[in-house]
Image: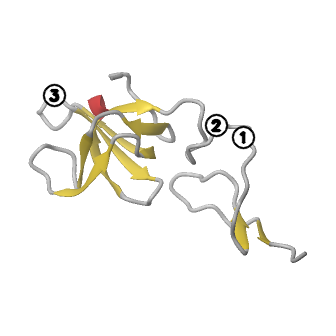
């Protein structure tokens, strides 16, 4: 697992079987969710080694919009994906009646709606 410092906005993936997502940085902080290996997200804050426990803590937001702090040694930089699980440039088929298109998310503000598409009826 990579110990490299990740910057705010870096796409990450959980690289261990189970990773505690905590309310605050530190091993004594409340666990708010247990993330499973492969969970993707984005770094939204840094607190490297300042809790006295020797752990580099990162504030993250997962693709499922869970927010909290994780120990940095259990996350890796996501490569080759755009956060959806598909490689950038992949052709995909969307099976829905409506689809909202948004630009890439800007941390911390949410992305505005660019367009709304409706499926044409044949």
Looking at the image, which residue is at 40% across and 45% down? 39
Looking at the image, which residue is at 60% across and 53% down? 105
For the N terminus, the image quarter is: top left
Mark with earlier residue (2, 3): 3
Residue 41 as seen in the image, left or right of residue 110: left
Q: Position of residue 74 (x, y in %)?
A: 29, 33
Mark with earlier residue (1, 3): 3
**116, 110: nearer the viewer:** 116
Q: Quadrant of residue 114?
A: bottom right
Q: Which residue is mark 3?
A: 54
Q: Position of residue 14 (x, y in %)?
A: 36, 38
- How packed mark 3 is, by other alpha carbons closer than 10 Å (few <14, some 14-19, many 20 or more), is few
- How packed mark 1 is, by other alpha carbons closer than 10 Å (few <14, some 14-19, many 20 or more), is few
Q: Which residue is mark 2?
A: 87
Assign a secondary structure to mark 3: loop
From this view, report whether residue 53 is shown above or below residue 98.
above
> In the rendered structure, are the residues bearing label 1 and label 3 in contact, judged by CB atoms less than 8 Å apart?
no
Among all residues in the image, which is located at the extreme right? 122
> In the rendered structure, are the residues bearing label 2 and label 1 in contact, judged by CB atoms less than 8 Å apart?
yes
From this view, report whether residue 111 is shown above or below residue 78.
below
Q: Which residue is mark 1?
A: 90
Q: Position of residue 37 (x, y in %)?
A: 34, 40
Q: How is the image coloured?
A: secondary structure
**122, 73: nearer the viewer:** 122
Q: Quadrant of residue 4?
A: top left
């Amino acid at each position: 697992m990579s110990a490299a410092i990740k910057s705010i906005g870096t796409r990450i993936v959980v690289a261990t079987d189970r990773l505690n997502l905590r309310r605050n940085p530190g091993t004594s902080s409340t666990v708010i969710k247990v993330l499973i290996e492969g969970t993707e997200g984005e770094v939204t804050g840094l607190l490297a080694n300042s809790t006295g426990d020797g752990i580099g803590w990162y504030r993250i937001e997962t693709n499922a919009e869970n927010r909290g702090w994780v120990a940095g040694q259990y996350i890796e930089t996501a490569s080759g994906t755009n956060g959806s699980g598909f490689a950038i440039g992949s052709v995909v088929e969307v099976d829905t009646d409506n689809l909202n298109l948004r630009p890439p998310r800007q941390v911390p503000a949410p992305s505005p709606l660019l367009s709304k598409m409706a499926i044409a009826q044949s």
